[in-house]
Amino acid sequence: MKAILGALAAGLLFGLGLIASEMVNPTKVISFLDLFGAWDPSLAFVMGGALVTTFIGYRFVLKRERPVNAEKFDLPTKTDLDPRLIGGASLFGIGWGMAGYCPGPAIAALPFMYTETFIFVAAMAVGMAVYNLVDGMLQQRAQPVLIDG
């Protein structure tokens, strides 16, 4: 229960930060991405602040023996670039540029009851479901077939 409450508090803080920084406003995000038009650099400061906070926070947290709500740290170990990573990052960037939303801000924007937010979140959920279905089929196909004989 302690882990769930900690995750809820972290998620609420993250969502409030997205709202306060206007990352939930697609127009603001698209203006940030419009480098040669009406560019709005304010979100660069939001992202820079997040990077600095994460950089400093990791220095303190990783000195601990273990996380507060887990048995061990679960850090990524994969460092190579593969087609799945590049493709996923490209799709993410294209979607962010087209819609002005990425998953976190879209979910944080739901309480504002904008129709386009609901459409985006529904499309995102369908996309995740399709990915899981296709990935499951590909994983199943990649398994060796054992023939008794």
Image (cartoon, grey):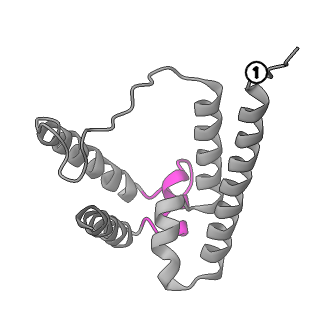
Q: Is residue 109 above or below residue 105?
A: below
- Seen in the picture, residue 81 relative to 97 is either above or below; the reply is above
Residue matched to label 1? 144
Q: Quadrant of the C terminus?
A: top right
Q: Quadrant location of residue 63?
A: top left
Residue 47 percent coordinates (x, y): 35, 50
Q: Which quadrant of the figure has residue 15?
A: bottom left
Secondary structure, mark 1, is: loop
Q: Residue furthest front?
A: 149
In the picture, which quadrant includes the N terminus? bottom left
Q: In percent of the image, x 39 and y 26: which residue is there?
A: 77
- In this view, 115 is above or below 51: below
Q: Is residue 149 magenta?
A: no
Badge 1: how crowded within 10 Å, few (<14), some, or many (20+)?
Answer: few
Q: Position of residue 107 (x, y in %)?
A: 50, 70
Q: Is residue 25 visible?
A: no
Quadrant of the image occupied by residue 6:
bottom left
Q: Is residue 79 left or right of residue 119?
A: left
Residue at the spot 50% in from the left edge and 84% down from the top edge: 112
Residue 8 picture location, percent across and down: 32, 69
Residue 77 visible in the shown view: yes
Q: Which residues are magenta?
A: 23-40
Query: Is 136 situated left or right of 108 in this image?
Result: right
Q: Is residue 9 left or right of residue 119?
A: left
Residue 31 shown in magenta? yes
Report the residue at 48% width, 83% height from top. Answer: 111
Q: Determine whether, in the image, residue 143 is placed left or right of residue 96.
A: right
**Residue at figure coordinates x 34%, y 65% from the top left:** 11
Task: State the residue lying farthest toward the top.
Answer: 149
Foreground of the two, 3 or 123:
3
